[in-house]
Amino acid sequence: MRKNDYYRPPASSLGKKKRVVRRKTGSSFFFKLILLLFFLGLLAGGAWAVVKVYRLVTSSQISDWHVKTVVVSGVTGNFNKVLLSLALPYEGKPFSVKDAVALRGEIIKKYPMLKDVSVKRGLLSGKLNVSAKHRKPIAKFVLPDKSVKYIDSDSTVYADPNPGLLEPVPFVELEGTVPEKMGAEFVDLVESTLKLRRELDFAFLRMNLTENTVKMYMPQGGVIDFGKAVDLKKKAARAAQIIALSPKKYAHPYTLNFEFFEYGKVFLTQEAN
């Protein structure tokens, strides 16, 4: 028998039609077109925004900014009127960043009882915004020259003819040169005694700024000598604990001495009649 020399495909492939894969060029084209239109839209929107901002800038004269109106916030009563009187002369006139810095400095210098002073320009509105807050004193000072000043929670010492006290604040006598800022330790002591007012109902505090020492004088005549103005918050809490027990044991005025507090010792000395 003669053998024919030809290729016979495997049986598994017989009877099957070849699949023709056609590329879908239409969907790819539309995708690219949409993407192109999207980027063109972004460019057009950006150009429109630039033109809009430029018109706003030129119409509001930012390069030569003028005050149209003045607004004062954060304070009421006399301080509101005072700040308004300082800012009103600029109305209708050019007002630069340098002018804003100068006005803020003038307010801080003239009115140390105000804090968080801010002078801002409303670039597109033409509005000059002046704001400040009235300091809240935590203690009242009597200086060596008998003048009166106050201290707030920021440790700032300042004068205020009208402090607007809603409740009495601790009375403090100062000895020595008074700085513009008091130490944080002293502020901690005052704030601690305010919280411990029931246990530490003192008449007044005396602080020697030269020696950096603090004494507390009680209404019954007792004295708490805190010594150096360190760890005052802890000393005040310890003094409150001792005083809570002392009336049951000691009838006469006494002195608490914290000189050796760092060694865990506090000495109580009873005074004679």
Image (cartoon, rainbow, N blue to C red):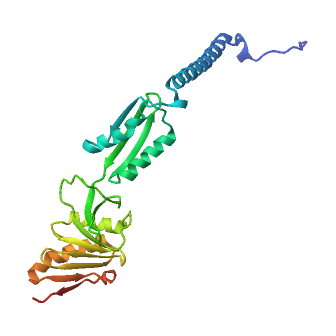
Q: In the image, residue 221 lies at what x, y percent?
A: 14, 79
Which quarter of the image is occupied by the C terminus? bottom left
Q: Position of residue 54 (x, y in %)?
A: 56, 23
Residue at image coords 13%, 73%: 219
What residue is at 32 percent from the left and 47 percent from the top?
Answer: 133
Q: Nearer the viewer, residue 204 or 149?
A: 149
Residue 177 vertical placement versus 225 (above, below): above
Question: Is 273 left, or right, of 257 in this rendering?
Answer: left
Q: Residue furthest front?
A: 89
In the image, taking residue 95 as reference, residue 11 lies left or right, namely: right
Query: Hey, which quadrant is residue 89 in on the image?
Result: top left
How many callouts does the rendering have?
A: 0
Residue that sits furthest to the bottom in the current view: 272
Q: Is residue 39 above or below residue 119?
A: above
Position of residue 73 relative to residue 230, above or below, is: above
Q: Which residue is at a point 26% across and 44% down the rendered structure image? A: 78
- The quadrant where residue 73 appears: top left
Q: Residue 68, percent across and down? A: 41, 28
Q: Classify the position of the N terminus by image quarter.
A: top right
The image quadrant of residue 37 is top right
- Residue drawn at point x = 40 percent, y = 44 percent: 118
The reply, left or right, for residue 17 in relation to residue 171 is: right
Residue 168, image x, y percentages: 18, 60
Q: Is residue 251 left or right of residue 127?
A: left
Residue closer to the observer: 255 or 35: 255
